[in-house]
Amino acid sequence: MKSPTKSELFRELPAVDRLVRAPGLAAVAAEHGTAAVTDAARDVLARLRNEIASGLLDATALRLALDGIDEAVKRELRQNLGYSLRRVINATGVILHTNLGRAPLAETAVEHIQQTARSYSNLEFDVQSGARGKRDIHVERLLRQLLGNGAQSREGSASLRVGGTAEAAVATSPVVTTSAAISTSTIVVNNNAAAVLLALNTLAEGGEVVVSRGELVEIGGSFRIPDVMGKSGAILREVGTTNRTRVADYEKAINERTRLLLRVHRSNFEISGFTEQPSIGDLAELARKRGLPLMEDLGSGALVDLEHFGIHGEPSVLDSLRAGVDVVTYSGDKLLGGPQAGLISGRADLLARMRSNSLFRALRVDKLTYAALEATLLAYVKRDHEAIPALRMMRLTKEEVGRRAESIARQVQSGKLRAEVIDGESVIGGGAAPSSVLPARLLAVSCSDLSPDELAARLRGCDPPIVARVEEGRVLLDLRTVFAEQDKSIADALMSINK
């Protein structure tokens, strides 16, 4: 018997109107509206046409598809009317997983967002005076407590050349200060890239910024330091080599057009071997001597000493300010453990200039970000680090993670599944502490009738989706990044696959 042609298969597809009026979809159309069901039906029929055209559907397969077309339209409708952004279970062991939304928020942050979102707020209103207020105050008061006047540890005076010669700067603006007069301020924009852009545009537009070649980094999303510098209007002046840069290289590059010295923290890679990099203190001393501001793009921006969490070589914001950095930029949703935001901390006089820059209004954040950030910072002020999920995950021991993995392994160890607990490592992620790993015990799962990739796909198909790693022919689940109350969801998902 001759197989039907593609044209004949196309003619088997029902018209959209007839499909929508079918008895099986009438109740759905009455509940959700004819327009929504029609859109879903069009999507299903278009998918069938594409599969016929590509040869994926023959006559038999098409008949099966048409037998279940009502259910296919209902599934499509549920997907169209549901949220695209949804929660997932992160079993990858990457704590600050950029693709999975980076740092999960503290419960107090979620509660504060809800309270702020469902009502009016005093975002820019001074309740006491009844006059207009400033949105910065909601977090700056907390950051002053956490950072204090860290910059005051600098010795000597700083005659800053910002926008001309040192003498011209003194004549045009009150930027000559002594260590006793220095105070620390913070402003918030929508991410660290915006923070870098605003700071460079304010302090160095039209002038040169001196930075080491070994620090011209690229992070996720093809964000490159030279590119954002170009957008800021500042001119890049590279010094040193990829692996070795000395203080003398910075000093030789300084000329009448220099506006800023820039240090970029290598947060997502390491250079090892024959290397040299000046200390931040040495750069601060050079900046003071030459009357220039020193800025550091710290990237992740920890507010606590991470040595206590087993993370080495990751400086904190306070470390940089105490070393003499004038302006530090960092992220809110990485090591800080809060919402997406870019924070700029440093000399109050320099940050005042950034506030007056028209870019600041374009880059500022909304009330929900301030609510989440305020609650996160308040946990730091209270020294309640356990309230911040990212820090809590870092603190988990290998044994604690292992006991949970063993409990799940005992529940699913039968039938098609083979589960065992093995030694492994968790990572920080989010472009932070690239060489630091946290020892862990991992749940390694394999299935007799599914490949590792197929098993991982089945887990992602659960509700909520479970995202795991595939390594060496097994699916690995790291419970460090799984909330304890989600362990049951993982066990249930594995047991459903085991049936």
Image (tube, rainbow, N blue to C red):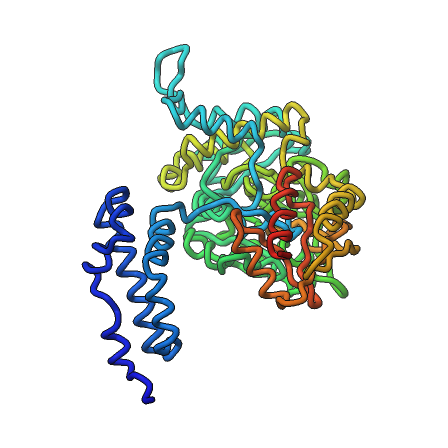
* In the image, residue 217 above or below residue 483: below
Q: Position of residue 176 (x, y in %)?
A: 54, 32
* In the image, residue 385 above or below residue 40: above
Which of 191 and 84 lies nearest the eye of the viewer?
Answer: 84
Say which quarter of the image contains residue 345: top right
Q: Answer with left or right where residue 454 lies relative to residue 53.
A: right
Residue at 48%, 24% in the rendered image: 137
Which of 404 and 319 lies nearest the eye of the viewer?
Answer: 404
* In the image, residue 483 above or below residue 122: below
Residue at 58%, 57% in the rendered image: 253
Q: Quadrant where the N terminus lies?
A: bottom left
How many marks the image carries: the answer is 0
Q: Position of residue 360 (x, y in %)?
A: 40, 38
Q: Is residue 251 visible?
A: no
Residue that extends furthest to the bottom in the rendered view of this protein: 2
Residue that extends furthest to the top in the rendered view of this protein: 128
Which of 6 and 384 lies nearest the eye of the viewer?
Answer: 6
Residue at 62%, 68% in the rendered image: 451
